[in-house]
Image (tube, rainbow, N blue to C red):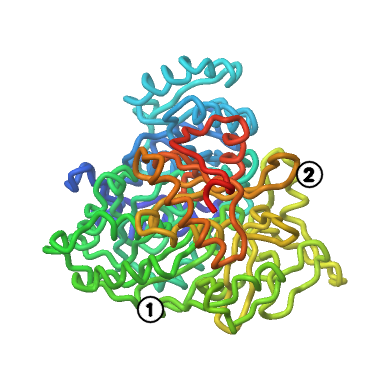
Amino acid sequence: MPHRIPSAERACSKSRLLDKLDQHWVQFADKTAFRFLAYNGEEAETLSYQSLSQRVFALAHALVEDGRRGKPVILLFPDGLDFVVGILATLYAGAIAVPLPRPHDRAAAQRIAACASNCEARVILTSHNAIPVLRAGLVQAGLEPSFGDGFRWMSEQDAAGYPTAWPPAIDLSDDTVGLLQYTSGSTGEPKGVVITHGNLAANGKVIQAAFQHDSSLVGVGWLPLSHDMGLMGHVFQPLLVGGESNLMSPLTLIRNPRRWLEAISKYRARTSGGPCFAFELACRRISEQDLQGLDLRCWRLAYCGAEPIRADSLERFAAQFAAAGFSAQALYPCYGLAESTLFVTGVAYQGGITAEQICGDALTESVIKRTPNEERTRTVVSCGLPAADHQVAIVHPERRTRCEADELGEIWVRGPSVASGYWNRTEESAATFQATLADDPEQTRYLRTGDLGYRSAQGVFVAGRLKDILIIHGKNRHAEDIEAAARMADASLFARRSAAFSTWLSGAEAAVLVQEVSGPLAEETSRLLARQIQASLLKLHGFVADEILFVPSGAIPRTTSGKVRRRDCRRLYERRELPVLSNVRASAST
């Protein structure tokens, strides 16, 4: 028998997000909302809409009673469904959720302490059994005292005895701050993006429209739930449409990517995806024999975003898994960022990939040319058109004027999904979220994304980061172009990470490439690989790197979504803290 939410208790709510959830707790009470899958693919936990709401309401009451309303609460959960309960309870309590990934080393623990200091959080909400381990890690790192006086840990055990049939009666609105999404920081220090209930509702609505979701949605997600793509795509989106979400740990994908596809096949999921590396990993680790038993005909939307989208990787995935029923039309390149909650642009549903071959040198001149020199081309993938009620402008970053079609500029965004700013960072908020066009008398505000791109009849094309431009021999060079050329130099490097950046060597700006490899290299092998990389750079871009360093897999710093953190990599290089297997200077490799 579905429970009822007393209307008087929710009459004060004007949060579209929570109002929609309230409808679905009743409408889909007995339906499965979430499953969590263990490493072996078996179901570890299942929650219906009704059982989920009961746990959420009890914990929300406990948070209100503890005085958390309007205050930041750090969410630091192990993999599992406790996180889902925790973040929803925080929102219902009128508190501000601060989802963060569990620390795996001292640097990660320091980041948590820095985030807590920035938002002045005094509570960490987690699973009860995780508290001793997490506390010991912070104590060992010498960081627990940095959380300040009155700091405490909370879990669902604190919710014992509280009402489970209705949420707290709290006046909430679309303007209520719901969460701080700390950017994982491919550049600079982590900053807390201020996301309101209205932002969450607006972005959920555009994802629903773009992905053509309804209550029949079945999704499979492996992304970290503390990250915007995992949170919006596989927690809020299924709840907002009344669908079903099947979750697994990111480690499950890393250990055995077939588990990802097994879950899609088993639960007949229509929506799943992730950054490009997930598709590359599946291609590399799943053999033709492993395709037996997989049926991917149900997979109607395979979204790809969060890092540079490589057409060759997605095309290879489509070809390799066609035998299991996967359709290339399901591939869905899209673009987004935490500062706009998540989703900004996407291609047509079931439209597949649209890629353009452009002259690589065109990007150094800021004008796109589609009559490429065959030796110096770059493939770029369309990320489609802006979401409904949102606008994208391509802007000259210095002049602050609109670029013409096929002219490279910075991507600016405005719309109801765009956040209001960064928590406790007034100057950075103004610079990033209050940008205006120089020739606009209305002074309409835009979000400056820091991403470079251009627009054509085929949509928005993302070309790289504004801060990831290297000036080599007087010309602008894009880090991603250098990294792509390295991957094309040898088959062993195709799916390996690399990081290109500029630094000072012998009194001049120099181009450095850090390349991950599978293991130790003999001296002759490293020199041969370096020569192949230099030949690829010379052929495609007309220059060579001043130094190439080979490092083991995993040595290049990355964000939680898999983006290369080039500035951090450069810092490690300059401090000589990279675990270098071998390095080759230009004079020795050319």
Q: Position of residue 429 (x, y in %)?
A: 73, 48
Left or right: where 270 falls relative to 428: left
How would you rate the neighbour count of disc 2 (Cα within 10 Å): few for under 14, some for 14-19, many for 20 or more?
few
Q: Is residue 193 above or below residue 544?
A: above
Disc 1 secondary structure class? loop
The alpha-carbon separation of the residues under discs 2 and 1 comes to: 42 Å
State how many labels appear: 2
Residue sitting at 85 percent across and 67 percent down?
A: 438
Disc 2 secondary structure class? helix
Q: Is residue 340 visible?
A: yes
Tag 2–tag 1 contact (CB < 8 Å): no
Q: Earlier in the sequence, mark 2 or mark 1?
A: 1
Q: Quadrant of residue 208?
A: bottom left
Q: Position of residue 420 (x, y in %)?
A: 68, 52
Residue, disc 2: 427
Q: Check residue 350 in the rendering and tell me which mark sits there, or answer none.
A: 1
Q: Is residue 190 above or below residue 354?
A: above
Q: Position of residue 249 (x, y in %)?
A: 31, 44
How would you rate the neighbour count of disc 1 (Cα within 10 Å): few for under 14, some for 14-19, many for 20 or more?
some
Q: Is residue 305 above or below residue 181?
A: below
Left or right: where 238 falls relative to 206: left
Residue sitting at 53 percent across and 33 percent down?
A: 73
Front one among 506 and 301: 506
Query: What amino acid is labelled 2 in the image?
Result: Glu
Query: What amino acid is labelled 1 in the image?
Result: Gln
Q: Is residue 179 visible?
A: no
Left or right: where 565 falls relative to 58: right
Front one among 39 and 313: 313
